[in-house]
Image: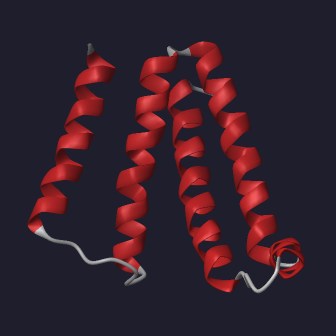
Amino acid sequence: MTHWTLILIAAAANIGLNLCLRQVGRAVETDSILRLISTVLLSPWAWASVLSAGVLLTAFVAAIRVYSLSLTYAAVTAIAMVGLTVVSVALQIETVNLARVAGLALIVAGILVSAFA
């Protein structure tokens, strides 16, 4: 498996992790510490978060074995940031404006420059 495949898997898992954690945060009950723990442990979104985190960690560790840590970390983070924004806009969780599009374009440009440097 190439390092870019591993980076894309890690980024996709990062997106999944963030979306699942958002759902956990919306459903968690904070009346007491016992209620907080029980709602987290019984939430299917929490378990999906654990699975996503496992995939993210596995792909990331495999990617840094074959490629530099600095580019791998930046690529996973940037791709996940762009992907999470796209998914959030598609799910109508967030809105998009010109400043956000420009920022995401700069992130993509930075990753491309780093990758080819």
Left or right relative to 61: residue 98? left
Q: How many marks?
A: 0
Q: Residue 112, located in which quarter of the rendered image?
A: top left
Q: Is residue 42 left or right of residue 59?
A: right
Determine the residue positioned at 77% across, 68% down: 46
Classify residue 95 by image quadrant.
bottom left
Rendered-image quadrant of the C terminus: top left
Measured along the vertical axis of the image, is residue 91 above or below residue 116?
below
Q: Quadrant of residue 44?
A: bottom right
Q: Nearer the viewer, residue 106 or 112?
A: 106
Residue 7, horizontal then vertical, whole percent:
53, 35
Compared with residue 70, is residue 89 higher up or lower down, i.e. above or below? Answer: below
| Furthest residue in direction left, as rendered | 98
> Residue 61, percent across and down?
68, 26
Q: Position of residue 106 (x, y in %)?
A: 17, 42
Q: Pick the quarter of the image with the N terminus.
A: top right
Question: What scheme was used to colour the molecule?
Answer: secondary structure
Residue 85 falls left or right of residue 36: left
* Depicted 32 relative to depicted 60: above or below: below
Give the residue drawn at x 55%, y 25%: 3
| Left or right of 47, for residue 99 | left
Q: Residue at x 82, y 81 (%)?
A: 32
Which residue is at the front of the view, 76 or 3? 76
Q: Position of residue 63 (x, y in %)?
A: 61, 25
8, 47: nearer the viewer:
47
In depth, the one of 69 and 31 nearer the eye is 31
